[in-house]
Image (tube, helix red, strand yellow):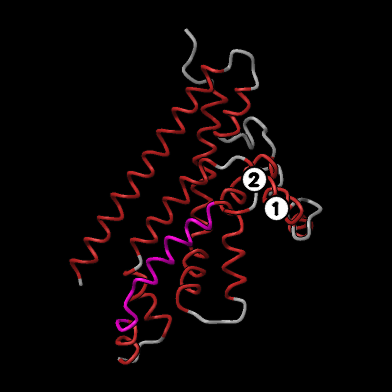
């Protein structure tokens, strides 16, 4: 009897989960900062920053992957210096996490930005008049109020990272056991004669993870919103 998925394919699923979790965990603090800055601050280059944040949504993923290779490859503008201290992204699972994080970042920032724009500035001003510093106001007033947006943004970014293919395969290739994520495994399976059945099983796994992430996103957003509403 043929196994439902091969060990290499299960490894690809596990690697996708690992890559997506790291992509979200590392990019979330920056995502909160950038989203809040775009929502509340006025500064030179604000529109340029907004454009750069959303650029991965517009560019073909292969282009984004190639730009990452030029920047973070072993001979890239930044990668050559990181290589000196033993930090390597190209053709490593860490590079897959970087590519997935870059592609998912716009969705994360958008969700958090909308939540930040919905916060009444008078609440923050009231805290400031009581003597609280701006960082303390952000931590104690703004951050709890935008928590639903942060949760939604993180889960949407996770789902996007799980499905990332073009930038990942361009930047880190498709090496089984090392950089082969779930979408890359589906692509590789489709290149094999009579691989349709295995590819369909991988698609079912991908579909299930995506649906669970979206349902969890909706549920957690409502739970957090109710708890915040109850304390208000």
What mark, if any, has residue 48 been given in the picture?
Answer: none
At 39% from the left and 43% from the top, the residue drawn is 213
Pointer 1 residue: 68
Q: Main secondary structure of the magenta part?
A: helix
According to the picture, the residue beneath numbered tag 2 turns out to be: 167
- The picture quadrant where one finds residue 19 is top right
Query: What is the magenta range?
Result: 104-123
Instruction: Using the image as rendered, state which of residue 172 and residue 105 is in the foreground.
Output: 105
Left or right relative to 34: residue 87: right
Residue 127: image location, x then y, percent:
31, 85
Furthest residue in direction front, as rendered: 58
- In the image, residue 11 lies in the stretch drawn in magenta: no
Q: Residue at x 53, y 39 (%)?
A: 16
- Contact between marks 2 and 1 (CB within 8 A): the answer is yes
Q: Position of residue 49 (x, y in %)?
A: 60, 70
Category of crowding for the residue at label 1, using alpha-carbon neighbours closer than 10 angstroms: few (below 14), some (14–19), many (at least 20): many
């Amino acid at each position: 009897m043929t196994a439902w998925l091969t060990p290499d394919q299960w490894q690809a699923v596990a690697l996708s989960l690992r890559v997506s979790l790291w992509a979200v965990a590392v990019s979330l603090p920056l995502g909160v900062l950038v989203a809040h800055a775009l929502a509340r601050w006025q500064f030179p280059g604000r529109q340029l920053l907004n454009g750069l944040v959303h650029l991965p949504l517009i560019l073909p993923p292969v282009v984004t992957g190639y730009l990452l290779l030029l920047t973070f490859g072993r001979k890239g503008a930044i990668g050559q210096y990181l290589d000196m201290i033993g930090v390597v992204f190209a053709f490593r699972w860490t590079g897959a996490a970087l590519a997935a994080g870059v592609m998912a970042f716009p969705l994360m920032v958008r969700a958090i930005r909308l939540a930040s724009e919905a916060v009444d500035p008078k609440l923050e001003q009231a805290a400031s008049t009581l003597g609280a510093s701006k960082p303390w106001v952000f931590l104690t007033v703004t951050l709890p109020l935008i928590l639903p947006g942060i949760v939604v943004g993180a889960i949407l970014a996770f789902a996007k990272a799980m499905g990332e293919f073009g930038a990942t395969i361009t930047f880190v290739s498709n090496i089984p056991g090392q950089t082969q994520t779930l979408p890359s495994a589906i692509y590789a399976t489709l290149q094999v004669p009579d691989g349709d059945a295995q590819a369909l099983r991988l698609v079912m796994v991908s579909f299930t993870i995506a649906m669970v992430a979206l349902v969890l996103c909706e549920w957690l957003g409502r739970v957090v919103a109710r708890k915040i509403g109850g304390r208000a």
